[in-house]
Amino acid sequence: MTGRAIVLYDGVCAFCNGVVRFVLHRDPVGRFRFASLQSDFAKALLRRHGLEAASLDTFYVVLDPDTPSERVLARSDAALMLLPALGGPWKALAAFRVLPAGLRDALYGVVARNRYRLFGRHDVCELPRPEWRERFIEV
C-alpha cells in the first residue's frame, strides 16, 4: 500500500473497535483513517460501489479514496491488506493470500457472526481519543 486508505468498521462492535485501536497504535504516520459503518459517510461511499453499509458483519478498506482508482476491499481481503501494511511481524500475514478467498472469507464469517457474543457490543459508537480524533471521519 502506498497511499492513504479508509477503514470502515462496525462502530458498536467491541472487537472492531479493538482492531481500530490496534491499527492506530501501529500507524503513527496516519496512513489509515476510519469511519463507522453506521455513519452517513460510509453509507454514501459504499453505495457508490453498489455495497450496503447495513451489512455490519463486513469490514472494509477503501484504497485510493476520492480518486478515479478508488476501490473497496471487504472481509479477508481487507484484513490481509490492512495488517501487513502495518509492517513488522504483521507482514507475515500476507502469506494467507495463497488460500482461496472463499475459504478465507468463510473463516472470517465465523468470527464476524460471533463477534458480539465473544467480544461484546457497545450501545453507541465509541468516541476516539482526542489525539486520534482527526483520523476519524464523522465523529
Image: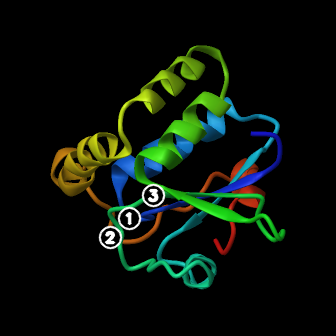
Q: Tag 3's secondary structure?
A: loop
Q: Which residue is mark 2?
A: 123
Q: Which residue is mark 1?
A: 12
Which residue is at a point 55% across and 42% down the rendered structure image?
A: 21
Residue type marked 2: Asp
Spatial CA distance of label 2 from label 3 is 19 Å
Residue type marked 1: Val
Residue 58 place in picture, x, y as percent: 39, 61
Q: Residues within 10 Å of mark 1 (few under 14, many from 20)?
A: many
Residue type marked 3: Phe
Residue situated in front as seen by the camera: 109 or 138: 109
Give the label on residue 59, or none. 3
Quarter residue 7 falls in: bottom right
Dot placed on the residue nearer the N-terminal end, 3 or 1: 1
* Position of residue 14 in the picture relative to residue 70 (left or right): left
Dot placed on the residue nearer the N-terminal end, 2 or 3: 3
Residue 4 place in picture, x, y as percent: 79, 51
Q: Tag 2's secondary structure?
A: loop
Residue 130 place in picture, x, y as percent: 71, 54
Quarter of the figure that contains the C terminus: bottom right
Residue 49 place in picture, x, y as percent: 59, 78
Dot placed on the residue nearer the N-terminal end, 1 or 2: 1
Whether pointer 1 and pointer 2 mark residues with C-beta atoms closer than 8 Å, the reply is yes
Q: Tag 1's secondary structure?
A: loop
Number of numbered discs on residues = 3
